[in-house]
Amino acid sequence: MTIIKLDESEGALPLYSQVAYHLEHDIEKGKIPIGSRLPSQQELSESFGVSRITILKALELLRDNGIITSKQGIGSTVIKAGNTRTYQSEGFSARYSKLGKKVLTKVISITQEECDAEVSENLLLIPGSKVIHIQRVRYLDDLPISVEHVFMNYKAKTYSILKTLRDNQSLYQLFKEELGLRFTYAEEKLFAELPSEENQRLLDIHVGHPVMKMLRVTYEHLDDPPTEFCRNYYNNETYGYYGIVSINLKS
């Protein structure tokens, strides 16, 4: 039996996320066809060299994302090829710097405010609760490609630390080093919509030109309340994005 080696180094994704990635990759490539059953939990445990508890959490992740269905006594059946990406994602800056791109990030504002309905729903807060709001603009080769809004539940210590964020500084590195946050999972949704006047100005796009709106809810652990909610707008002429991801971002 071939044992699939997982990354157990410090900072790597949880083992169950890595298992879910490998299984979904095989599903997307057709190695595990839609309608077929996954190997048993015991077989998967032996193949990946992990405990059955880890396998159960990986299957739960795939099930939550609609990739498989499970029934007692039958096992897990593939019901669709995933549009989920459960991989370790590089940060924005690292990814595009490797491609030789000039990457810039400008901090527009860092404020505390009452959350709107969308923010409260995604952060599981009471409407009107106080949140931290960070607004930034991303640039590639001096062209604006995204307007990013980051929301977190307000805590005085968190706010004082995030207020130190500067242009071109890694937000996720600040989360990790100063706040001890290590995000492992995020759910993302994409929409097309017409931009607000502010987004037209910040993205330097024409009136009537649609933007891609991305909503992302980020967790430290799947079973914990969400830690961060992002509402981002992309110039879809210069930037493409997709996925629901488990992440370990660096910027």
Image (cartoon, grey):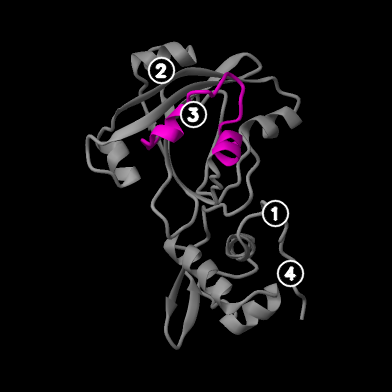
- At x 39% / y 28%, what residue is drawn? 133
From the image, tell me which residue sits under label 4.
4
Q: Are marks 1 and 3 in contact (CB under 8 Å)?
A: no
Q: CA distance from mark 4 to mark 3?
A: 40 Å
**Tag 3 or tag 1, which sits nearer the N-term?**
1
- At x 38% / y 12%, what residue is drawn? 207
From the image, tell me which residue sits under label 3.
162
Residue 27 position (above or below residue 166): below
Q: CA distance from mark 1 to mark 4?
A: 19 Å
Which of the 4 image quarters holds residue 30? bottom right
**Eye-nearest disc, 4 or 3:** 3
Residue 217 lies in the magenta stretch: no
- Report the magenta residues as a range: 152-178
From the image, tell me which residue sits under label 1.
10
User: Looking at the picture, which amino acid does disc 4 mark?
Assistant: Ile
Is disc 3 surrounded by few (<14), some (14 to 19) or many (20+) residues within 10 Å?
A: many
Residue 84 position (above or below residue 180): below
**Eye-nearest disc, 1 or 2:** 1
User: Looking at the picture, which amino acid does disc 3 mark?
Assistant: Leu
Judged left or right of residue 251, residue 126 is left
Q: Are marks 1 and 4 in contact (CB under 8 Å)?
A: no
